[in-house]
Image (cartoon, grey):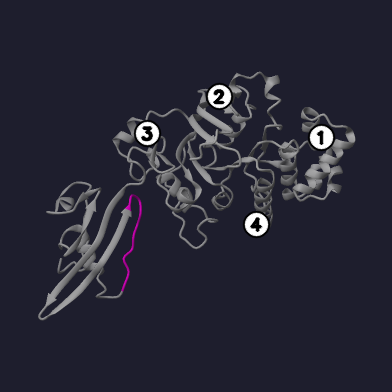
Amino acid sequence: MSAKKPLLEIRKLSVTYTSSNPPVTAVSDLSLQIRKGESLGIIGESGCGKSTLALSIMRLLKNVRTEGEILFSGENLMDLTEQQLRKYRWKKIALVFQNSLEVLNPVLTIAEQLEEPIWAHERLTAKESSQRIVEVLKMVGLDPSWKNAYPHQLSGGMRQRVLLAMALVCEPELLIVDEPTTALDAASKNEIYYLLRDLQKKIGFAMILISHDVAFISRLTSQVMTMYCGQVVEYGRTSDVLKNPMHCYTRGLLNASAQFFKYKDLWGIGGKPPEEMRTYEGCPFAPRCCQSSDNCRKSRPELRYVALERQVACHKGGIESFLKAEGIKKSFQVKNRVIQAVKRADIEIRSGEVVALVGESGSGKSTLAHTLVGILSPDEGSVFFRGKKVENHWATRMMEGMQIIFQDPFSA
């Protein structure tokens, strides 16, 4: 991790909507850091608390109970009055909202809406303000002539650019982008990607990107955070998390992403999120998890480091390796010949995975399978089931252990 001081630091943030009965906790005990120039992606199903987190950072939520600290450049935004917060909104922290039609005022022109944050934060003349609007529209790839248009006269991609222009018009240090590609076609999505990438390089703002599009997240962010039921379940470098997810929920999201796995069967995630978010005694993902145990339902797992710059909230330290074989070598003596049936085979099967062994007859598939369950002893190498070496048939004698269905029922 960089030693630079965080631009934004959130400590144990919890947000509860008190207007509902019973109250709904949308964000629970969440902590994160982001430094100048960094980009953080947030992924998760709808209703997991991503947008609530974004609005909480801006302190825009009403009728909520908020606990914890939100530190921006060392200043705790939780301690500021509404008047003091206005000095931070749009000038220091800006938010690109999710739905352009609902956010933009239908009876004001684009120029009039872009002028509002300028008037609130900048001491500019009318001429200077107009020039700033022209510059920011050009910056986001819109012809300045559109400044006199109304929102309904623009396409979805153009409205998204207007929202981005509105967020950047006062040159903020932190940009929060909430679902920038929702309802956009593939070409428009690509344009928004290049726009955000180029603007961050040019201006140098830090960015929090919220999206269901995992491919979009993978191209724009250096860190990624997975949220479920208002809690962080995995946090790490984007490249590491997407290549090797260590929480069952993150893996399910990736395997359900058509954009990320264009040529792969989509696994999805069994079950569905709870209809009402609430505070759980145990892990909120336990009812849908393929490796949950009694302990998962009794106590909530803490977010812990399991590797360099990788945190996972799981009692088992992440996705469990059920079966692992290293350097398996097996040969048979047939008269004067030695047949190498398996040559230095390595295999790892993690919780919830289905692994297929394919090959021609005589390629060693059955020999390897018999070696994995302990029917045959390997000449070299070792087999581990749930971290314990397989020997003396203990793994096939226990409940919830390991078994084999043989190839030929008559010989079996």
Closer to the N terminus: mark 3 or mark 4? 4
State which mark lies toward you, 3 or 2.
3
Identify residue type, mark 4.
Ala
Indicate which disc residue 301 carries.
Answer: 3
Left or right of 409? Residue 299 is right
How far apart are the two marked residues, 4 and 1, measured between alpha carbons?
A: 31 Å
Who is closer to the viewer here, 295 or 347? 347
119 w.r.t. 65: above or below: below
Contact? badges 3 and 2 (CB < 8 Å): no
Whichever of labels 2 and 1 marks the residue nearer the N terminus, that label is 2
Which residue bears the numbered disc 1? 115
Q: Quadrant of the C terminus?
A: bottom left
Up the image or down, 67 lies above or below 150; here it is: above
| Residue placed under numbered mark 2 in the picture | 20
Q: Which is closer to the viewer, label 2 or label 1?
A: 1
Residues at marks 3 and 2, CA–CA distance in whole angstroms: 27 Å
Residue located beneath label 4 in the image: 186
Which segment is the magenta one? 350-359
Identity of the residue furthest to the left in this view: 335
Q: Secondary structure at mark 1?
A: helix
Q: Position of residue 120 (x, y in %)?
A: 78, 28
Q: Which amino acid is tagged 1? A: Glu
Precedes in sequence: disc 4 or disc 1 = 1
Q: CA distance from mark 3 to mark 1?
A: 47 Å
